[in-house]
Image (cartoon, helix red, strand yellow):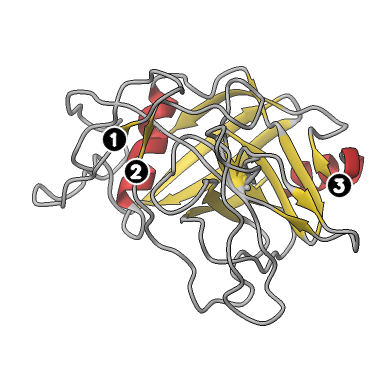
Amino acid sequence: MRSPSIDVESAAGHTPRHRAPGRRRWPTGRHRSRRWPVLLAVPLLAVAAGVAFWQIGETGRNAAEEPPPAGIAEAPAGAAPCTYERSEGEGSAELPPARPQKAGLVQVTMHTTHGEVKLELDADRAPCTVNSFVALAADQYFDSTPCHRLTTAAIFVVQCGDPTATGTGGPGYRFPDENLPVGNLPAYPRGTLAMANAGPGTNGSQFFLVYKDSDIDPNYPVFGKVTAGLDILDKIAASGAPNNDGPPNLEIIIDAVEVS
């Protein structure tokens, strides 16, 4: 998704293919080659009927393994390593530790200019995605960044995670997909937290929050859910966006992301 690039993330993305009758397509994004995802940032194509097609995209960082913050379960010593690869033309965040540092459910508070949005990350189902998100949060990568995209037709997401606010930004690395909601209807129900990207294996830093059931192609890794603050997303959505897909008319900025 530009990224919701949902197509969600901050890189340009490719339009997802239909995988089931009636399912919407969505770009992701953060690379310039990607389209707007809800989830990565690449501009979307809007259909005359008002149906938006998106793409989500993104990238990340390398660092020595560090102990997880107090109160968060450590991943098992034998946890499979993650693969984070450097990408061209993006940011230069450090790569996350190769081995997941968290396990179970990880509680996160996203402090915004409109209040707190609480998230629950599932490190068991999406260990490498959660590992990247938590590492970026620890490096204050998301601090003082706007949620750059709102989609209000066919796909209903607020997309964040691009410090450049262009829908093409990312951490400078990418990683493979995991925990795709294949077979689920809707694929992305209200409250879902997922990555934006520009195609398979292009996840980075852009992510999207679903404020209304969105049945789009299951190409965007689900790594958690919103547990509080959906009313804030509803308020942002009610403000609208240019042509139903663009910067929200009511600006929302992430002040900080706190992992507890």
Q: Residue furthest bottom?
A: 21
| Residue 250 placement: quadrant | top right
Amino acid type, residue under disc 2 in the picture: Phe
Name the element at disc 2.
loop
Q: Check disc 1 and report its element: helix, strand or loop.
A: strand
- Looking at the image, do the residues carrying marks 1 and 3 touch, with CB atoms under 8 Å apart? no
Residue 83: x and y in percent read: 24, 43
**Cα separation between marks 1 and 3:** 34 Å
- Mark before the other along the chain sequence, 1 or 2: 1
Residue type at mark 1 is: Glu
Name the residue carrying label 1: 85
Which residue lies under the disc numbered 3? Answer: 244
Q: Residue at x 22, y 32 (%)?
A: 97
Say which residue appears at 64% left-offset and 39% top-offset: 42
Q: Residues within 10 Å of mark 1 (few under 14, many from 20)?
A: some
Give the residue type at disc 3. Answer: Asn
Check disc 2: other Cα within 10 Å, few if <14, some if 14-19, many if 20+. Answer: many
Residue 208 shows in the view: no
Residue nearest the viewer, comparing 86 with 186: 86
